[in-house]
Image: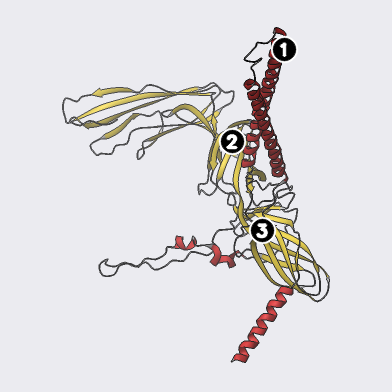
Amino acid sequence: MMKNVFILLLILLSHTAAAADTPQQSVPSRLKKVTVYQQGAQITRSATIDLSTGMQEFVIGGLPAEIMEGSLQVKGRGAFTILGTHFQKNYLQPGSEKRTIRLLRDSLNMLEEEQQEIRGLLGVYQHEKEILLANKQVGSDQGGVGIAALEEAMEYFRSKLRRISKEETELKSRLTKLEEQIQRIKKQLASLNSQDKEATGEVSVQVTSKKPGEGTLEFTYVTLNAGWEPAYILRASGMGEPLELTYQARVYQGTGEDWDQVPLIVSTGEANRSNQQPELTPRYVGFIAERPRPAQRSNLEKQAMPLATESKNLRREDRSAERATSQKRTRQIRTEYRPAFSRRIPGDGKKHTLELSRRSLEADYTYYAAPALREEAFLLARINQWDQSRLLPAPVSLFFENTYVGESFLDPTRTEDTTELSLGRDPAILISRGERRRFETDQLIGKHQSVTWEWTIECRNTKDQPVDMVINDQLPVSTNEDIEVEPLELSGALYDKEKGYLEWKTRLAPGERITKKVRFSIKYPKEKKINY
């Protein structure tokens, strides 16, 4: 038994010694590709290694301190074998600051040193002034002093105090400007999120080789400190013209390094989303007193569990880089966009806009008005069926005739065949709703009384082209069988009795004016009152 223990200890010691003797070498790496998801980014880096015979360990540092567990993948190219990999945080080597931040910090230090120097000079002048004032007595207690000596002494004190006062004024003015500069630099540093990082990440890769040579390590990992948000720009050059829809990505990343001229892929996928399909669990019903239902974790809670147990789902087979000619790539469950030109995405956490795609859409233009709410006409662009299955819901900035008219929201996931967007108010379409008039009729016979309301709606087209117009209004809807709403005159409006909505569809020629009249009555019991 003791012999077996002794042999086991020898084996452990030999392995420990071998690990301790394994040469360790730090090697730099460079960015090769970045795939940014709606939340998170997959980063691909490569490092060149110098191989020697036997086992070696290479350490690649300067990585983000936080990466998604289970997302690290390492592969190599060359005559060597990868034995194992390990990711860890390095608290002894904090993240390096960007050049802009270093310059700002250096400037701040210089200004603060000058600030201290000026405060020191002000203290010297104050002390000098106190000495002069403490020794302002001329002559002695036994005798006076001559006029000439007195004038000379007064001139001396006056000259000295004037010089000190002038120097103090100039120094205080310089100090005020310095403090303003210092505050501006501090605010700029704060906006750049320039706090020093507590740690960086590093990957250790153990390899073995039968002969010296050169090799390449390529590794990928996912960090959640990045992402993108969709946005749209919709431009209409004029009535009857197609719409131009620009699909944009507002990319942000705070990984601590700039993505400078790196091939970038924008993916509609989500790096941190659970890929486990939901599963139903039995739900029981019974008497509470006899058989309480056991507490069970819901499917939503299961999907919200930490991703450490689902890291296998994040691993993907290595694939070749996308071809430069491929601007858009549609996969089974996501779409990937490659911007036409590589650009710099600073690691400052701010949003930087990239254009993903641009398309032309046919649209029908219609004016809409609801004068009961606003006596204004709104121009609507109605987009009929179009390929929107791969787009994401996002805000849209609207431009009409090269003028910004406001923002709306485009939701391509809606199932309606037509997407409707408001391009803003048009003062060339005049619309008004007349005062509501009330006529009350008290019936002498019977238990009911009737009240009649009426008003007019006027609409005028002052444009030099015809326009299609939709006008909406409404009648009250009865909530009681004893209250009866009866339309008397609707000027040809479509009437939805269930909701009380009125709708007129018309085409207005240039300069044409139309008038619509609404007249209806409400009949209800005499002893009751209504709230209309």
Q: Is residue 138 left or right of residue 289?
A: right
Q: Secondary structure at mark 2?
A: strand
Q: Quadrant of residue 132?
A: top right
Q: Quadrant of residue 9?
A: bottom right
Q: Which mark is residue 43?
A: none
Separation (CA) of disc 2 from disc 3: 51 Å
Q: Is residue 477 above or below residue 457?
A: below
> Farthest top residue?
147
Instruction: Indicate the amino acid at tag 2.
Output: Leu
Residue 339 image point, x, y percent: 70, 48
Tag 1 or tag 2, which sits nearer the N-term? Answer: 1
Q: Is residue 163 above or below residue 46?
A: above
- Image color mode: secondary structure
Label 3 CA crowd tier, 10 Å (few <14, some 14–19, many 20+): few
Instruction: Indicate the amino acid at tag 3.
Output: Leu
Label 2 CA crowd tier, 10 Å (few <14, some 14–19, many 20+): many
Q: Which mark is residue 152?
A: 1
Q: Secondary structure at mark 3?
A: loop
Q: Is residue 298 left or right of residue 466?
A: left
Callout in the foreground (2, 3): 3
Residue 27 image point, x, y percent: 76, 62
Work out whether residue 277 or residue 176 is closer to the camera in this orientation and state it.
176
Tag 1 or tag 3, which sits nearer the N-term? Answer: 3
Residue tagged 2? 398
Q: Residue drawn 64% across and 31% down?
A: 180
> Farthest front residue?
142
Residue tagged 3? 92
Q: Secondary structure at mark 1?
A: helix
Q: Is residue 372 above or below residue 75?
A: above
Tag 3 or tag 2, which sits nearer the N-term? Answer: 3
